[in-house]
């Protein structure tokens, strides 16, 4: 059968119309699948979850995308994090007043966050910092002055003898001076703090996605779009990168930040429930002169119930020569091979001296990583138009996280971090 030229043209036009219709349908389907928000937060850690809460509470539409806790480090196929643990110290004793100010603002709000979320994540048992006047000289006076200015009389200077009388299970070397910092200093459960912040963010309207962001495209004028490992696409006008140690490594943006990722190892020392109960009022401890070959300072958290149903005392340190992690592969192998066994052994030896009568059930090493900045101040800035970054916990990011999230959001909404001023009165000494 011969088809006339007219009919051929008509069929061709129908065909083109059909293609165009299909194309339009595909586009509109894509539009439905691509959700749009005013703000996107990438990274659901301690800082990101606080930021998502503040953004949602401001009335803006916001989504947060982040990963779950690894079930098993070896088989984990998403970014690791700095918060997968149950013990973090909150203590305002800091050498740099700017840090102390941020921490103070943050921990003052913990009580309210607990009440609003109905999630308990904080145990204000206080914190003892042991130091050595002969080592620090004027530096020690500076710490006293800053802390006294921030906290009034809630810090006491004790002799080792007074410390032993107050906390008979703890042993303090006699050459050391002790600073006892009272409530609100204490111990944070970081996983529960994230749960509390996420619950509040969600209640205020934030969408929460469990996924890994693999690409970021677009610009401030036309808007940004992100793609995730599981095929989601989200659009937004402004983005906050709160990806902790992955800020540079993930390669989502060209701009690089001056952060350094430090691998550390902690000791989890298991104790029986009865032992944990007898140590219930034990404060956290930060020992500035631990007398250990590998550590600058050592810290320990009183027994905490971990997600595996066991009680552990967590002991950690700042290494004198930490492992620097510069790529995703280096981070992965640090987590897979459980950090440094030598450090874990040193921490166990330290624990045996600090709590000599403690019956231990078992112990294990646990790897972790921290994100440091050159000046030890957090990094909160607009990296490029519409893309913001909040990272650089420097080992105090858990206690400071609520304020760091708030500062990042203030920068995104108002162009300034609106940093709080403390009532520090330099030159005051402690009681
Ligand atoms: C052993 C150890 C002890 C510490 N002790 C204390 C302490 O006593 N007191 C204290 O205040 N602080 C402490 N810290 C520091 C504190 O835990 C960190 O500062 C804090 O976790 C940093 O928060 P963050 O939100 O920047 O990063 P994180 O908590 O690491 O959160 C970043 C999140 O982003 C996710 N992410 C990364 N890339 C992507 C991506 N592409 N897509 C989606 N999600 C992504 C990560 O998986 C992670 O969940 C300690 C840290 C360690 C490791």
Image (spheres, rainbow, N blue to C red):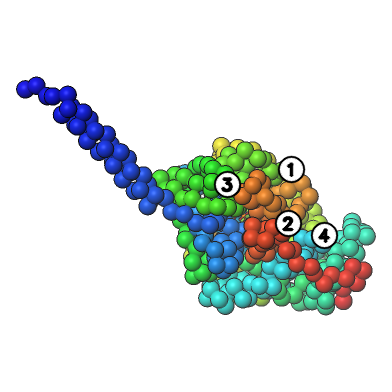
Q: Residue 278: which numbered mark, if any?
A: none
In the image: residue 305, left or right of residue 97 = left
In the image, 48 versus 28, the foreground residue is 28
Residue located beneath label 1 in the image: 321
Disc 3, SS:
loop
In the image: residue 430, left or right of residue 209 = right
Q: Is residue 176 above or below residue 429?
A: above
| Residues marked 1 and 4 touching at CB (< 8 Å) | no
Residue located beneath label 4 in the image: 95
Distance from the alpha carbon under mark 2 to that under mark 1: 14 Å
In the image, 179 versus 115, the foreground residue is 115
Distance from the alpha carbon under mark 3 to that under mark 1: 45 Å
Distance from the alpha carbon under mark 1 to that under mark 4: 21 Å
Q: Position of residue 112 (x, y in %)?
A: 61, 76
Q: Earlier in the sequence, mark 2 or mark 1?
A: 2
> Which is in the foreground here, disc 1 or disc 4?
4
């Amino acid at each position: 059968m011969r088809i006339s030229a007219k009919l051929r043209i008509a069929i061709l036009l129908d065909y083109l119309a059909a293609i165009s219709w299909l194309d339009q349908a595909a586009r509109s389907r894509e539009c439905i699948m691509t959700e749009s928000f005013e703000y996107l937060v990438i990274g659901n850690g301690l800082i990101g979850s606080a930021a998502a809460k503040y953004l949602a509470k401001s009335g803006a539409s916001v989504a947060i995308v982040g990963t779950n806790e690894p079930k098993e480090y070896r088989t984990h196929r998403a970014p690791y994090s700095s918060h997968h643990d149950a013990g973090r110290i909150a203590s305002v004793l800091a050498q740099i007043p700017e840090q102390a100010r941020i921490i103070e603002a943050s921990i003052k709000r913990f009580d309210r966050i607990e009440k609003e979320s109905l999630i308990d994540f904080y145990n204000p048992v206080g914190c003892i910092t042991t130091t050595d006047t002969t080592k620090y000289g004027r530096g020690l006076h500076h710490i006293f002055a800053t802390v006294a200015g921030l906290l009034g009389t809630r810090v006491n200077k004790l002799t080792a003898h007074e410390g032993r009388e107050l906390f008979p299970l703890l042993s303090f070397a006699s050459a050391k001076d002790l600073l006892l910092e009272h409530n609100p200093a204490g111990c944070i459960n970081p996983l529960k703090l994230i749960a509390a912040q996420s619950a509040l963010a969600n209640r205020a309207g934030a969408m929460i996605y469990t996924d890994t962001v693999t690409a970021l495209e677009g610009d401030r004028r036309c808007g940004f779009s992100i793609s995730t490992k599981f095929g989601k696409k989200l659009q937004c006008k402004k983005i906050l990168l709160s990806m902790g140690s992955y800020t540079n490594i993930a390669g989502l943006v060209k701009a690089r930040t001056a952060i350094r990722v430090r691998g550390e190892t902690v000791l989890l020392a298991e104790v029986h429930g009865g032992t944990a109960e007898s140590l219930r009022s034990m404060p956290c401890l930060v020992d500035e002169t631990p007398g250990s070959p590998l550590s600058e300072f050592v810290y320990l958290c009183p027994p905490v119930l971990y997600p595996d149903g066991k009680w552990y005392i967590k002991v950690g340190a700042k290494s004198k020569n930490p492992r620097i992690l510069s790529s995703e592969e280096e981070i992965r192998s640090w987590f897979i091979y459980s950090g440094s066994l030598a450090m874990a052994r040193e921490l166990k030896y330290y624990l045996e001296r600090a709590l000599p009568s403690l019956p231990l059930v078992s112990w294990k090493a646990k790897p972790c990583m921290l994100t440091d900045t050159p000046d030890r101040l957090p990094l909160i800035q607009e990296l490029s138009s519409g893309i913001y970054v909040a990272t650089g916990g420097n080992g105090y990011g858990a206690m400071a996280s609520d304020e760091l999230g708030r500062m990042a959001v203030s920068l995104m909404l108002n162009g300034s971090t609106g940093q709080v001023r403390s009532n520090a009165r330099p030159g005051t000494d402690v009681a």
